[in-house]
Image (cartoon, helix red, strand yellow):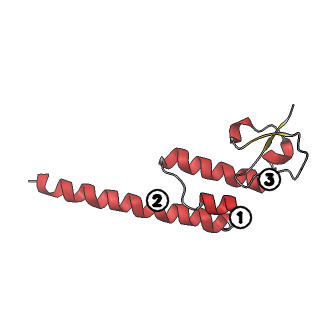
Amino acid sequence: MVTHYTGESGKIACGRNNHYLVSTSEVSGVRCKKCLGSHVYQQGVWFGEFQRHTGTEPMGLEEWAAGTMPFAKAAQHSLTCYRIEVQEMVDRLERQLNPLIL
């Protein structure tokens, strides 16, 4: 049986709407070729990769999933928030390091 991709909004990425479809929001479990080629699936993969690489929850993911924010804006928001978070961490570490330098 083919497993389809269901985004956070609950819609099947390939556009099918049969109530008996097997679907998942886990990108690694998707087997439908149309779902795998869809923009919704690729965008979901991007958010998953962002979280895997940064270790932080993507900001804007919920808004994108709810359909209240386009992907491009949600992804940029995630990146901006992550940059701010990283810069704050770098500044804090630098402040801690400065007294240790002789």
Provide the secondary structure element on which disc 3 rests: loop
Mark found first going from the N terminus, 1 or 2: 1
**Does 54 sit above or below residue 88?**
above
Nearest to the observer: residue 66 or residue 15: 66
Residue 101 in sight here: no
Residue located 19% across and 55% down the image = 96
Nearest to the observer: residue 64 or residue 91: 64
Mark found first going from the N terminus, 2 or 3: 3
Quadrant of residue 21 within the rendered picture: top right
Residue located 88% across and 44% down the image = 19
Residue sitting farthest toward the top: 1
Left-right relation of 85 to 76: left
Distance (Cα) linking label 1 and label 2: 22 Å
Total label count? 3
Quadrant of residue 69 within the rendered picture: bottom right
Q: Which mark is residue 11?
A: 3
User: Which amino acid, mark 3?
Assistant: Lys
Image coordinates for residue 70, horizontal then vertical, percent: 68, 67
Residue sitting farthest toward the front: 19
Looking at the rendered image, the disc whose residue lies closer to the viewer, 1 or 2, is 1
Image coordinates for residue 10, horizontal then vertical, percent: 76, 51
On the image, numbered disc 1 is attached to which residue?
Answer: 67
Q: Which mark is residue 82?
A: 2
